[in-house]
Amino acid sequence: MLVLSRRVGESIAIGDDVVVTVLEVRGDVVRVGIAAPRSVAVHRAELLAELESSNKEAASPSDDAVRSLAEALSTREES
Amino acid sequence: MIAQETPVRPGLRNDVRGSEMTEIPVIELVQDMPGFPGLNRFALVQLDEHGLLCALRSLDDPQLRFLVVPPAAFFPGYEPVVDDDTVEALGIERVEDVLLLVVVNAGTSVQTATANLVAPVLVNTATRRAQQVILDDPSLSVAVPLAAA
């Protein structure tokens, strides 16, 4: 990990397209602004980790699981 | 027997029953699905006859698909707010063009199936661009049971 120290108002450039700016420091909370193109996802790390894990668990269910879910939903729809 | 997969031209309603289908519309993700880098081209296929259960099938990796449902049928109060960046990224011009889907984890049975409400998939049916949008709402969960809905 590259470690840099910045003051409020200063920035860090990442690659060609991403700029991180320290906006405010209040107590132990740092407010950070990120300028990045739309193609680059920017999220709280722990939220992204949770989402990755959720997507991976949900991905590519077995045909059996799909079939029983489809049947259950049809029943629901018809009731 | 494997469930019949019907390719869907994304519709403008709460289910995804398509109209005339001449080719399989390619849905282009403007950002990777978290956990699945580099796979941006998907097709939306219908898995049941009511248009409630669908799959986003990767056109780049034949093994990959995500089960998705339109949430209105299960979570009627669910109205995620779409931010301006997403509107711009997907080229959304009319709210009617937006198809809202949530990823379903089939679990081991219907009782354990859950839907991800914190990161819905938004599809702009006009541009066919889509994105899994992570909502900044701590009250939403990544695994909400479908059975309770």
Image (cartoon, rainbow, N blue to C red):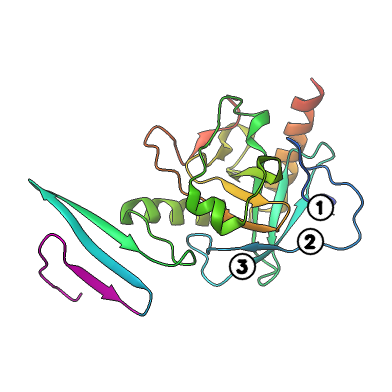
Q: Image height check: is A15 above or below B39? A: below
Question: Mark 3 vs mark 2: which is more N-terminal?
Answer: 2
Q: Position of residue B71 (x, y in %)?
A: 63, 35
Q: Image height check: is B106 above or below A6? A: above
User: In the figure, is residue A74 to the left or right of B121?
Assistant: right
Q: Image height check: is A69 above or below B32? A: above
Question: Mark 1 vs mark 3: which is more N-terminal?
Answer: 1
Could you classify mark 1 by the number of other residues whose Cα lies within 10 Å: few (under 14), some (14-19), or many (20 or more)?
Answer: many
Query: Which residue, given by chain and number where applicable, does mark 3 sit on?
Result: B40
B76, A76: nearer the viewer? B76
Query: Which residue, given by chain and number where applicable, does mark 2 sit on?
Result: B25
Where are the magenta residues, as a range?
A1-15
Query: Which residue, given by chain and number where applicable, does mark 1 sit on?
Result: B9
Q: Position of residue A29 (x, y in %)?
A: 14, 48
Task: Report which quarter residue B105 is drawn in.
Answer: top right
Residue contact at pointers 2 and 1, CB within 8 angstroms: yes
Same chain? Circles 1 and 3: yes
Residue contact at pointers 3 and 2, CB within 8 angstroms: no
What's the chain of the residue with tag 1?
B
Q: Position of residue B9 (x, y in %)?
A: 81, 52
Mark 3 secondary-structure assignment: loop
What's the chain of the residue with tag 2?
B
Q: Quadrant of the C terminus of chain A?
A: top right
Specify the farthest residue to the left.
A27
- What main secondary structure does the magenta stretch of the protein show? loop
Q: How far apart are the alpha carbons under marks 3 and 2?
A: 13 Å
What's the chain of the residue with tag 3?
B
Residue A9 falls within the magenta-colored stretch = yes
Residue B20 falls within the magenta-colored stretch = no
Question: Which residue is depicted at the point 51% across and 34% down?
Answer: B144
Q: Position of residue A57 (x, y in %)?
A: 52, 53
Disc 2 residue type (three-letter): Pro
